[in-house]
Image (cartoon, rainbow, N blue to C red):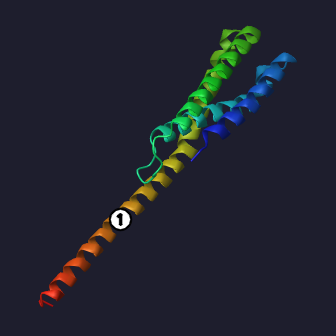
Amino acid sequence: MIDPITAVSLATGAYNAIKKGIAVGRELQDMTGQLSTWGKAFSDFGFAEEQVKNPPWYSFKGSDTSTAIEIFAQKKKMQEMRSEIKNFISWHYGPSAWKEVLHIEAQMRKQRKEEVYRKAELQRAVIEWTLGTLIVLSGVAGLALVLYFMGKQQGKW
């Protein structure tokens, strides 16, 4: 699973590089690497947030308010970075440049969903099905064992 805090730290690093690049007058096309990294981190944060909101059933961790508060704070930080990037890009390159960034971000989200998130979801499904199967088989074996000993005690076997 992708950690929300790791995603925020990646986004912060890319955000600082973008901000620095804009400050020194770099072209938007020259910063596609940083924009790509930031878009991936933003997308990863959204996916991680959904994973935290919907934990697997086999996770015995209860409702953790400190985690919820931290996710909320990190989400606000990500929204602030997004807003500042939008303002920087729109101010220095015009509103059409922000549309270009949104297009790049949409492509990154789609690519991440197809590659990384699908793997994570498949891995989670395999774990859930494996654990579920083991629990059911253990229950059936336990029931069979109880029935065997009950039958043996009654002299039926």
Q: Quadrant of residue 58?
A: bottom left
- Residue 21 spot, x, y in % from top left: 83, 22
Judge whether 22 appears above or below 38 on screen. Answer: above
Judge whether 109 appears above or below 154 on screen. Answer: above
Q: How many marks?
A: 1
Which residue is label 1 attached to?
135
Q: Nearer the viewer, residue 39 or 148?
A: 148
Callout 1 amino acid:
Ile
Residue drawn at point x = 62 percent, y = 29 percent: 74
Q: Residue 37 vs residue 48: left or right?
A: right
Residue drawn at point x = 84 percent, y = 20 percent: 26
Q: Secondary structure at mark 1?
A: helix
What quarter of the picture does the C terminus occupy?
Answer: bottom left
Judge whether 23 appears above or below 91 on screen. Answer: below
- Residue 59 spot, x, y in % from top left: 46, 52
Residue drawn at point x = 63 percent, y = 16 percent: 99
Residue drawn at point x = 58 percent, y = 40 percent: 112
Local crowd size for mark 1, using a 10 Å CA cut-off: few (<14), some (14–19), many (≥20): few
Q: Residue 57 vs residue 75: left or right?
A: left
Q: Nearer the viewer, residue 49 or 108?
A: 49
- Residue 2 spot, x, y in % from top left: 59, 44
Q: Quadrant of residue 19?
A: top right
